[in-house]
Each structure stands twice: as structure tokens, then as C-alpha cells.
Image (spheres, rainbow, N blue to C red):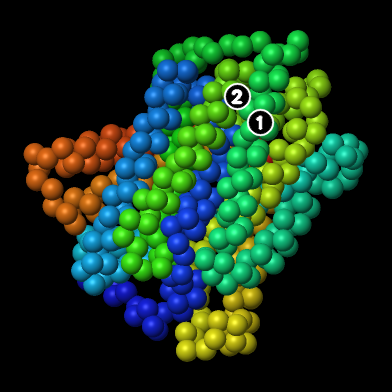
């Protein structure tokens, strides 16, 4: 089957409007940081409890090195295609062109849509939970439920989603970068305070008692770490750069991974140091146990929750851009102005409906932790750890005896296996936890 032809940019409203190419490298750095460095880093101590100190630090480092390498390769492929007169602004078009397969076009768009919609739902769910935490502390006997806060968050997201282009999020995403540093430092400080206090929890770093359980827990943890490092929209982020794009994305990646180094390691090490194998899937919950006093000053935890809440809006917006680009490529008229009634009215309606759908799903299915691991295994591992290597090998054709080729093939094999095992172990855990699930529950199931 021939690959679907890429629509001409001058006739493609999704490209001309949502993915307009006006950004500089630091704008790409802001977008990348928002796409990767989010509140999911607060699950890193939870991931470490399935791996232990040594394997946890090794996996975290390996994922960081491999993803930076992977994203750099993908950027080089995009740059090479542009030099050959085929500038790609969408992941699906890049994969279909390089691989020469119409099926790959649909595979990528399916995975991307699942990931991006899942993250949009997760962002709304966690933002609603943040509001619920604040509310329950201010009004312990209040009558509002989780789905009420999810509805509030959804309304805010509907308003923010009317920002017309990916590039228009650059200032919001700069704020997101500082917010991620802010709540990380607050959480790390809270963990150090908790670990040194007289009420410090007993520390136990032992793993599961049975070998099979240890193996399943390890692969689930690997899937979680893969999801945390995941970024399934790099081509779309690179599309926002003003041409020529050569070298700009690497600078953006260096900015992003500087923030990653500071935040990921400090959150993982401090949280696991304090709570060990009792770490919760959200370290803030570990610091605010249901029974007993909070393990850190209330103002520190409260400010951390507010920072997380605010950043979740930015994350939801970033991962909605692919959906908006698809919508506008079909519904908008590129010959009319971006704010003309012909384009503005459909944009408002479609983006509102999309956010209402995400909000409804968040309220109905508040099962974040297990789903996060499955998304990492099924979605992010193929897009971030397999496809970039394949695309690079096909585009640049390194010799089979070259170091680059051998590294790429090794990564493909290792992470395909890890993805399969992670999928199995994550689905297994989802099934084991199924008895805790309740539609429209007022508590997020870890």
C-alpha cells in the first residue's frame, strides 16, 4: 500500500495554524521540558521500589542516555529529510515516508492518539486530585467529590485550549519549566525533612519475596520509567521551529535534559531514601499519610501541590496539540484568517468537545498508576526506543559492522523485549488491582 501523501503545507490548516513554524531553539526546549518533566517524576520512588537502589539508578541513567540518543537521531532524520526537500512536521508522515508503508502511518497515528489522549485524561485527573487535596485540608468534612474538581479543571482547560497554535504556548511552557523545578525542590526538601525527623518512617529497601514477583515488579517499574521519559511528539515540536532547523533541536534537548538531570535524580533518590518499599505512586501522598500527621510542613506540601496543579494545565495543552492539528487539518480553511468566524467557531466547538471527553473519562476511570505503566510499555517504548533507530538506519544506511548500527540494533532488541515483558506485567498488575476500581470513584486508584 502506498503511504498517504502529505498534504501541501499551503493547503493544510493543521500545519499552517497549529504547527506554525516561528519558534527558536529555546522555545523547543520549553516544549520538550513540559512534554517530559511533569508530575510523573513523583512516581520515581515507586518505580525504584520494584528495582532497588542499584538497578533503579542504572535503569534511570540508561533510560536518560537512550532517550537523549533516540531523540537526537530522530531530529537528524527530520533534518536530512528537509535537506532533500521533504520537510516533515508530523511523526506519522515521517514514519510513512522513510519506511514506505501506509500501515506505519496508521500505526503511529493510533499510538500517538492513544498516548496523547491518555496524557490529557491523566493531566485532568491529577489536577482534579490536587484540587481535592487542597479542599480536603481546608474543609475536611466538605461534600465535594473528585468528579466535581475534575469538572472545574475541565472548564479551565476548555478556556486555555483556545490558544490557537503550539507556538503560542511558549510562555506557558517556560512557566511550566520553573514550576517543575519548584515542586521538585519542595518535595526533595520535604523528603529530607521527613527522613531526619523523629517521626521518620522505618526504612526497608527489600524487594518482593518471590522471584517471579520481583521480575514482574521490575518490568512494571521499567515501563513506568519509560513512560516518564517518553515524548511521542518530538517531530511536532521540531515543526514549530523556524527553518532552517539544523542543530536547533539538539540545543533544545540539552536544555530539557539539564532539567531532567536535576529533577529526576533528586526526586527518585530522596523519596526512595525516606520511604523505601513503602513508597506511594505519588510521593506527595507518602508525605501526607491518611493516618497520622504530615511528615513535612503544611505550607511546603500545599505549595508543592499548587505548583503541580498549575503545571498540569500546561502538560494537558501540549499533548492536545496533535489532536487539534488533526481536527483543524479537516475542519479549518487555510485561505481564511486563523481568527475568522469560519475557523474560530469550529475550533471552539471541536476543542471544547475534546476536553469534555477527556474530563468525562478522567471522572469515570480514576485509575492512574496501573494505566501509566501500560501506556509506557505499549505506547512510548515503540515510538521512543524502537522507531527512531529504525528510521535512522534506513535514512543514513550505516554499515552493519559500524558501531552506530550495532548500538541501534541492540537498543531495538532490548527495548522490544522490555516492552513485551512490561506490557504483560503491567496488564497483570491492572488485573490484580481491578477489585479496587470503581467508576466515578472519589479516590484515585494507584
Tag 2–tag 1 contact (CB < 8 Å) = yes
Q: Position of residue 344 (x, y in %)?
A: 61, 81
- Residue corresponding to mark 2: 271
Q: Position of residue 94 (x, y in %)?
A: 30, 63
Q: Taking 197 as reference, is 91 left or right?
A: left
Image quadrant in which you'd find residue 198: top right
Mark 1, secondary structure of its residue: helix
Which quarter of the rendering shows the C terminus?
A: top right
Residue at (83%, 39%) from the top-left corner? 136
Question: Could you tell me if residue 220 is visible in this image?
Answer: no
Q: Number of callouts in the render? A: 2
In the image, residue 84 sits, relative to residue 317, either above or below, namely below
Which quarter of the rendering shows the N terminus?
A: bottom left
Front residue (pair 14, 422) = 14
CA–CA distance in space, label 2 to label 1: 8 Å
Residue at (27%, 55%) from the top-left corner? 76
Residue 187: which numbered mark, if any?
A: 1
Question: Could you tell me if residue 393 is visible in this image?
Answer: yes
Residue at (62%, 52%) from the top-left corner? 175
Characterize the local packing of mark 1: few (<14), some (14-19) or many (20 or more) Cα atoms within 10 angstroms: many
Amino acid at each position: 500500500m502506498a503511504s498517504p501523501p502529505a498534504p501541501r503545507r499551503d493547503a493544510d490548516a493543521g500545519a499552517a495554524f497549529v504547527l506554525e513554524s516561528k519558534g527558536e531553539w529555546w522555545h523547543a526546549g520549553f516544549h520538550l521540558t513540559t512534554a517530559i518533566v511533569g508530575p510523573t517524576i513523583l512516581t520515581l520512588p515507586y518505580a525504584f521500589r520494584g528495582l532497588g537502589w542499584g538497578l533503579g539508578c542504572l535503569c534511570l541513567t540508561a533510560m536518560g542516555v537512550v532517550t537523549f540518543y533516540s531523540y537526537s537521531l530522530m531530529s537528524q532524520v527530520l533534518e536530512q529529510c528537509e535537506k532533500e526537500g521533504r520537510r516533515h512536521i508530523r511523526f506519522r508522515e515521517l514514519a510513512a515516508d522513510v519506511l514506505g508503508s501506509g500501515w506505519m502511518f496508521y500505526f503511529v497515528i493510533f499510538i500517538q492518539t492513544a498516548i496523547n489522549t491518555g496524557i490529557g485524561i491523566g493531566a485532568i485527573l491529577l489536577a482534579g486530585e490536587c484540587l481535592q487535596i487542597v479542599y480536603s485540608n481546608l474543609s475536611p468534612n466538605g461534600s465535594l467529590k473528585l468528579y466535581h474538581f475534575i469538572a472545574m479543571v475541565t472548564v479551565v482547560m476548555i478556556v486555555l485550549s483556545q490558544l490557537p497554535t503550539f507556538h503560542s504556548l511558549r510562555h506557558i511552557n517556560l512557566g511550566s519549566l520553573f514550576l517543575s523545578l519548584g515542586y521538585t525542590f519542595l518535595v526533595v526538601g520535604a523528603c529530607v525533612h521527613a527522613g531526619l525527623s523523629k517521626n521518620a518512617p522505618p526504612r526497608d529497601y527489600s524487594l518482593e519475596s518471590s522471584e517471579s514477583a520481583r521480575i514482574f515488579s521490575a518490568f512494571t517499574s521499567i515501563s513506568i520509567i519509560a513512560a516518564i521519559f517518553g515524548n511521542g511528539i518530538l517531530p511536532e515540536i521540531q515543526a514549530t521551529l523556524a527553518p532552517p532547523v539544523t542543530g536547533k533541536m539538539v540545543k533544545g534537548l540539552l536544555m530539557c535534559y539539564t532539567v531532567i538531570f536535576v529533577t529526576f535524580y533528586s526526586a527518585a533518590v530522596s523519596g526512595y531514601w525516606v520511604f523505601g518499599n513503602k513508597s506511594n505512586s505519588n510521593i506527595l501522598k507518602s508525605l501526607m499519610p491518611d493516618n497520622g500527621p504530615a511528615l513535612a510542613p503544611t505550607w511546603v506540601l500545599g505549595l508543592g501541590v499548587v505548583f503541580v496543579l498549575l503545571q498540569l494545565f500546561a502538560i494537558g495543552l501540549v499533548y492536545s496539540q496533535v489532536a487539534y492539528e488533526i481536527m483543524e487539518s479537516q475542519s479549518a480553511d487555510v485561505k481564511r484568517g486563523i481568527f475568522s468566524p469560519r475557523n474560530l467557531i469550529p475550533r471552539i466547538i471541536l476543542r471544547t468537545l475534546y476536553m469534555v471527553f477527556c474530563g468525562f473519562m478522567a471522572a469515570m476511570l480514576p485509575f492512574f498508576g496501573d494505566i501509566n505503566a501500560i501506556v509506557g510499555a505499549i505506547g512510548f517504548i515503540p515510538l521512543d526506543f524502537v522507531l527512531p533507530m529504525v528510521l535512522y538506519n534506513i535514512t543514513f544506511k550505516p554499515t552493519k559492522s559500524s558501531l552506530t548500527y550495532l548500538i541501534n540494533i541492540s537498543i531495538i532488541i532490548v527495548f522490544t523485549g522490555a516492552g513485551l515483558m512490561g506490557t504483560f506485567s503491567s496488564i497483570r498488575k491492572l488485573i490484580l488491582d481491578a477489585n479496587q476500581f470503581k467508576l466515578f470513584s472519589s479516590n484515585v486508584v494507584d
